Amino acid sequence: MPSAPDDLFAKFLALGYVAPDDLKEMQERSSALGIPLAEAALLADRLHPDARAWILSESLGIPFLEVEPDSISHDLALLFPEALARENRIVPIAREGDRVTVAVTDPFRHGAFAVLEEMTGLSLRMVVCPGRTIGGILARFYPDPSGLEPSDLGEGSISLEEAEKWLSEGGKKRVCGQILLHAASRGMSGVRMFPFGRDVVVEGRSEVKSVRLLSFPLRFRKPLFDAFLELAGVPGGSELPPETVFHLESGTGVVALQASFLKGLSGPEVIVKILPDMRAGISLYSIGFNPGQLDITEKVLRKGNGLFLVSSPGAEGVATTLFAMLREEYRPGLRTITVEERHRFRNEGYIQLNRRQTVERFSGNWSRLAESLEPDILMIEHLPNPAVLADLLLLAQAGTLVLCGIRRFNFDRALRTLLTLDVDPFILAHVMRLILHQRLVKLLCMECRRPVPARPSLRMVGERYRAELERVVADASFYLPSGCPKCGGTGYSGRMALIDLIPFTPGVQNIVASEDTLEEKLSRLMEEDYYSAAQSVQDMLRRGMVTYEDVAPFFR
C-alpha cells in the first residue's frame, strides 16, 4: 500500500501541486478511513501528475530524477518501439553496455517493463521522472506526424471565443481534445455533448454533480459531433460503434477515454467517460475490506489458481473489486485477460476485451477462449448465465486463476447457485477459493454532516446483531447528511463496499463435499469461517462515516 512522508505535502503546497482545500479533504479522509495520507491523496486523484509520481517514487524506493530532454541521446530512441513507448510513457535515458536506465511517470507499469526486457534482451533500471520530462523526450524521439503536439492540447481552461475560432478554422480535433483534457485534469469522470434548445452544451461530469463547460450555437452541432468521431478514430460515414476506446497524450501523461455516440430525437449526442488508471491508488483495503477479510483474501489469492466469485445486487463496484484482486495477484510475465461489460479502468499488461468481442469470436464459450488465448488469469466482470460456472470450475481446475462477478444476487442465492451446480461436489470444494458478496453504502460528507440528537431504535435489528449494536449505540455519535459546496449539496462524499465472504478453508471444503442436504450445508457454512460485513458497519458507525438508516438493512 502506498506510503510516503507526510512532510512531502508541505513541498507540494509550496510548489502548487495540491490546493490547500484539497489537502485538507485528503487529510480528513486519511483520518476517517485509517489509511496513510499518501494513499488518500492517490484515491482523491486531485494531485498534480508530478506530485503523484513523486509519492509513488518515495513509497516504492525508486529514484525520482529531473533531466533535460535535450540532454538525452537521440540514438536511444532506436531501443524501444514508438507505439509501446508512447502508450506506456516509458523512455530510455541512459545506457551502459547491456544496462539501460528507463524513465517512467508511473512505476506500476510492470507489464510494459517486462515486455521490453524480453524484447530487447537488456537489463532495465527504472527511475521516475516528471510528466513534462517524459513528454519532452517523447516529442524529441518521435515527432507527431499529425502536427498536433501535446502543447496544443493544454490542460488549462478553454474559452468560448477560442473554441469557436478553432471550429471555424477547421481545428475540430484540437478543440475537442482541449475539452477532454481539461475535464481529465480537473478530476472529472467524463464529458457529455448534447443539443439543448438553440445551443449545443458541453458538460463535465463528476460523482456528485454536472458542470456546464461550454455552450455553442446550434450550428456547431455537426462539426462538434464529427470532431469527437475524428478524435476517437471512427471513420467518417461508417456505422456508429456502440462505444470505442481511444487515448489522448498531453504533456503530463496519457488519458484513456471511452466514447459512446448516439443519435437521439433531439440530435446527435456524445458521452465520453474518462477511464481511471487502476494500477495505483486502488487496494482491497480502500474498497472496504476489513483487516480480517483483507488478510484471508490476500492469503487465498496467493495460491495463484482456483475460482473466485464476487456477487452483488447490481453493478455495485464489482469491477473495482475484481481489478483490485488482479492488482494483488499481479506478477510480471503472467498473461491476464479481462472480459468487461464496458471498459471502466485502464491497465497496460492486461488483454482487455469486452463481452461483445468474446461472444462474436468465441460464442461465449470460455473453454474456446482459454484454448485460443491461454490465460494465466481470466477475469470476467459479469456472468449473465451462472450455469457456466461449472465450465469455469474446470478451467480453474486445470490451473487458471478465474475471477468472475454475478449480479442481481444476494449472498444466500449466490451460495445456493454454487452448491447446486452440475459438478462433482469434491471438485467444487477443492477448486473454489472464495465467494464474496458486496453492497455499496454512501459515505457522509465529513465537512457538513450534522449530529442526530436522539439514539437510533434497534427494533428492526435482527436478534443475532442486537447485543453488539447495543454497545455501538451506547458509545457512538450519529449523524445525518446536510449538504455543502464541497459535496455538491448532496450530504455525501463517495461510497464504500460492505462485504460478506466465505473462504474455502478445509472446514468449508468438508461441508461442501459432504452428503448433507442443501439447507444443512447452508446452515453450517454460515457458522464456519464466515467473515461478515457487521464489523465494518460497526466501525463506520463509531467513526460517524455513515447514517444509521443507510446501514440498518444490513442487520436484519
Image (cartoon, rainbow, N blue to C red):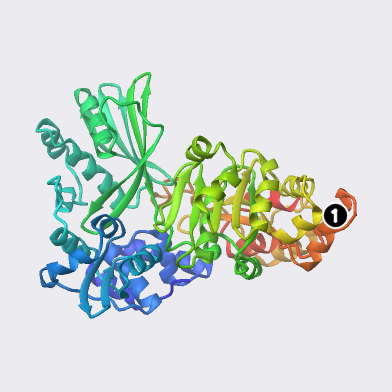
Q: How crowded is mark 1: few (under 14 residues within 10 Å), some or many (20 or more)?
A: many
Answer with left or right where residue 42 lies relative to residue 247.
right
Q: Where is residue 452 in the image (x, y as percent from the top left)?
A: 60, 55
Q: Position of residue 334 (x, y in %)?
A: 49, 63
In the displayed structure, 483 sits above or below 536; it is above
Q: What element carries label 1?
A: helix
Three-letter amino acid code at disc 1?
Lys
What residue is at 14 percent from the left and 48 percent from the top?
Answer: 145
In the displayed structure, 461 sits above or below 468; it is above
Residue 6 occupies which quadrant of the picture?
bottom left
What residue is at 67 percent from the left and 62 percent from the top?
Answer: 538
Comparing 340 with 392, the one in front is 392
Residue beneath disc 1:
521
Q: Does residue 453 appear anywhere in the picture?
A: no
In the displayed image of the protein, which residue is found farthest to the top?
265
In the displayed structure, 535 sits above or below 230; it is below
In the displayed structure, 525 sits above or below 121; it is above
Answer with left or right where residue 289 lies relative to residue 185.
right
Comparing 143 with 529, the one in front is 143
Q: Where is residue 389 in the image (x, y as percent from the top left)?
A: 68, 47
Residue 465 occupies which quadrant of the picture?
bottom right
Comparing 409 with 481, the one in front is 409
Q: Does residue 13 appear anywhere in the picture?
A: yes
Q: Position of residue 256 (x, y in %)?
A: 34, 49
Answer with left or right where residue 348 lies relative to residue 101.
right
What residue is at 49 percent from the left and 57 percent from the top?
Answer: 336
Number of residue marks: 1
